[in-house]
Image (cartoon, rainbow, N blue to C red):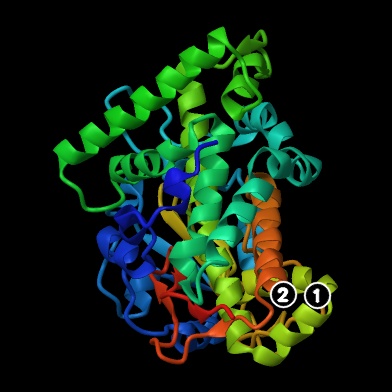
Amino acid sequence: MSTEVLLADDPLYEELYDVRREAEAMGNFVDRDVTPDVHALRAQAPVHRGNLRQLLGLEPAQRHVLALGKQHYSVLGFDACEAALRDPKRFSSKVAGQPNERNELSMSILEMDGSLHRAYRRTIQPRFLLLEAVDWWRKKTVDSLIARLIERLATKDRAELNIDYAARIPVYTITTAIGLDGDDALTFRDAFVKSGGIRRNSIEVMREAAATVERMLLELIEARRHEPQDDLISFLLTNKLRVPGEEPRPLTDREIIHVARLVMIAGGGTSWRQIGITLYALFAHPEQFEAVKADRSLLEAAIEEGLRWSPTAPLFYRWIEQDTEFYGVEMKAGEILELGLGAANRDPSRWEAPDRFDIFRPRQTNLAFGMGTHRCLGMNVAKVEIELGIGALMDAFPKMRLDPDKEMPFLTGGLEQRGVSGLPVLLK
């Protein structure tokens, strides 16, 4: 794998991996800490009629086209969120779909439910199981990427870890695992982000970017069809889809493209923010940071606590499939449920002093990766990236600390995505 772009000071990193800029481009930036207001709402009831932004007094913003103009309900309690995630018959994921000219699925398994979802997920999942995460993914990409980045940092006294480190691990892990050359990673990521319709780009920019994404993937699929290699595209070309009541068949090129896009969404755009959040939390709690450095078995607890304390994707949506009553609130079919996973992870009925980052608190399952049939497909890979990435930094730079001459970092973003403003550090 080429390392030129991986190790370069490319301006695209600043453009693609700035959490505030990302939220502003999506039109959902939040300029204050809404945690106290969320606590106050949850204390009144676990489920509220209304859009969460509206309930918090924020400017309107809508992530999903299919949710426009619909009545929304906000779920803020842990038990209620978990119940909704485990009930896809009432609360469907199809709201994630994006209408398109081909009238086809746009978000792959993210917008599927039931037997169709299970069939497609089983086709993809073998590459994302825990054993694969600690074996294939490490050998294929993660270990070598981290080693090269650490070598680069070792030549410096200072670094901005959000850009110089955290942003680079997931995007190269995912891109090279798909089968693209490493130096295509930023080009592909840039086109992918511009093509999605999430950021405020012109129709012309979106179409051009979508064409770039499709061209790169179709060229890769065709190349792997003639000469398979040890990558995800080759894996998908040889695997078969088994939908109940149908004959097993290979995935179509369009279906493989959708899977590749899904993997980029799930891996290339979330893990980098969670690496930053975890590092920020440890820097902000030096006594816990020192404890982890002294006892590396605590690193897993630190990662889990970071996921609970501030998940990078704290708000998800569901389509209400039928008239129903949920936690005392009457809802109509075709309306929208907003699941506040970040709010649920700070429910004081489940966690004592939930706003406190504490790696020593009793371990309980949190909802950072979701729950039920749609639990994050790439969670094992993400955890491996975070654990190996932070562990390698601790090994290489035991005196690493926040740079006192720079602005102190803070959490930022929108309700749907959170991250750290930056991570300027002294390495030595």
| Residue drawn at x 55%, y 42% as measured from the top left | 174
Contact, CB < 8 Å: mark 1 with mark 2?
yes
Question: Relative to 163, is 365 on the left or the right?
Answer: right
Q: Three-letter amino acid code at disc 1?
A: Leu
**Residue 338 percent across, percent down from the top left:** 47, 61
Query: Which residue is the site of mark 2?
Result: 302
Answer with the quarter of the image where residue 413 lies.
bottom left
Query: Which residue is the site of mark 1?
Result: 298
| Residue drawn at x 51%, y 24% as measured from the top left | 256
Q: State the residue in front, 262 or 229.
A: 229
Q: Three-letter amino acid code at disc 2?
A: Ala
Question: Relative to 376, is 185 on the left or the right?
Answer: left
Question: Relative to 179, is 139 on the left or the right?
Answer: right
Disc 1 crowd, CA 10 A, few/some/many (<14, 14-19, 20+): some
**Residue 164 percent across, percent down from the top left:** 47, 63
Answer with the quarter of the image where residue 212 lies.
top left
The secondary element bearing badge 2 is classed as helix
Disc 2 crowd, CA 10 A, few/some/many (<14, 14-19, 20+): many
* Viewport quadrant of the N terminus: top right
